[in-house]
Amino acid sequence: MAQSADGSAGLVTLEWTDGLYYKVELDFTKGSHYETGAAYAAAIVDACPGYEAAVDALLKVSVEGGKDLPDLDTLIANAKELLADMPAGYAEEIAGMGAVFSYDVDELGDGRLSQNELLVFQVVHDVLDPACSACAVYGDSSATGETIVGRNLDWYDLEALSSLHAVTLFNNGENGNSVIGMGFLGQLFTPSSFSGAHVSAAVLDSDMNQGYFSCEGRDAYLADIRYALETEGSVEAVAQYLENHEYTHSFLTILADESVAAVLESDQERPDAAGLRYADSALREGIEWPYADAVAAVNANFLPGTTDNYAGASNELRFASYVSLFGEKLADGGTMDMADVLDVMSYGGTDGVAKSSGAIYRAESDYPSVLSYALNMTTLELAACFGPTPGNPAQPVYIEVFSGDPFTNFWAEAGAVAYS
């Protein structure tokens, strides 16, 4: 059942849905950002008693799996640098949540959540990098001409993740575009998001030759993505906003609106070569993408002159899978619909492992796909699998999250099996 935090005056509504994910509405029309953040944390405490332990475990395994094995004190210092440059309202939301999650010891593995650990969780993608892949069709490659995005979020194999899936509405009323984020309970800046202006953004890791840049004077890219979606109305405008900021680490963003999709390659090492990659963009030598009105992305830059981080079986075999699967579906003038996109995103190869069989939907034994979805950018129909999913290869089952525009009726009943 839906429940609101006590004394929140309807600021926050939170519901555990279909035994799979939390559905959350943060209503900024009814109170301040600080009040909404505090109400959100209070609602989480009521609805999810194991929340602190789950986030603590997520942070611990993320730190232990990080490329540079950063210590917690360093992550906290970096997170505070990023907080300093955030929009004031976002910082207030974090402060409000921190009034509830305020354990006085910063220590991973203790099952508790301090204010500093909460802050690291909010900017975890800026200081610790996940994997992922994505694709999109539009125009003549789409069965309806509508843009359809497919996306897999691949992260650490952690049982607690499956208890934290969340689809969150950031309801801004008349004060900018409202945004829906797909990520984990308590996240204010989600790795996959879309707006009431029918623009979507989902991030992917992109390795650098060096480690992370200093966080001083740099921005949190997921916070910037939320802000851009709240204020802009097209792929190009969102990309331009992001291109005007500097970040701690390179990343990719698959961007889509009702007319087009593209991959923004935010290469922080070679920013002059970075930019939007369209279906017909020139690519670096050795990379071929022969399909019009369609894009795909793994954890690599493809634009000429960008940092070459493509080498490695995981990237090479997954991209080969995208090329092959799109070739089968678009052969002889074929087109792709939602079911076709989900068919691509659910491809598990022979063993669910990216580096051995080009699996796009990755098994628990690999770097598992914890979220997989397809989103229609015109109707905003959304079908998702909240993983990870057992099996090698896994057989994900997708449910209907939204059958139509959720910005007009976020709490409409859904949950039927959409595709499997």
Image: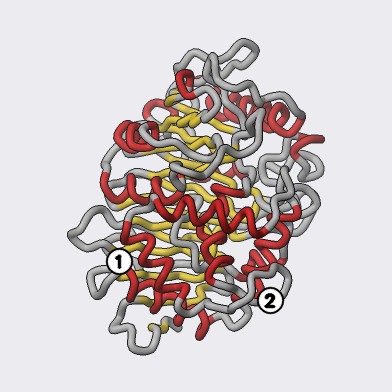
Q: Quick check: 345 above or below 161?
A: above
Q: CA distance from mark 1 to mark 2?
A: 36 Å
Q: Quadrant of residue 11?
A: bottom left
How packed mark 1 is, by other alpha carbons closer than 10 Å (few <14, some 14-19, many 20 or more), is few
Disc on the earlier residue, 1 or 2: 2
Q: Is residue 46 left or right of residue 140?
A: right
The image's mark for residue 48 is none
Q: Which residue does the numbered mark 1 point to in the structure image?
A: 409
Amino acid type at circle 2 is Gly
- Which of label 1 and label 2 is nearer to you? 2
Amino acid type at circle 1 is Asn
Q: Secondary structure at mark 2?
A: loop
Q: Which residue does the numbered mark 2 point to in the structure image?
A: 111
Q: Is residue 305 left or right of residue 376?
A: right
| Residue furthest left in the image | 174
Q: Secondary structure at mark 1?
A: loop
Report the residue at 30% width, 64% height from top.
171
Residue 159 is at least partly visible in this image: yes
Report the residue at 65% width, 71% height from top.
54
Q: Quadrant of residue 60?
A: bottom right
| Residue furthest bottom in the image | 6
- Is 357 in front, or is 77? 77
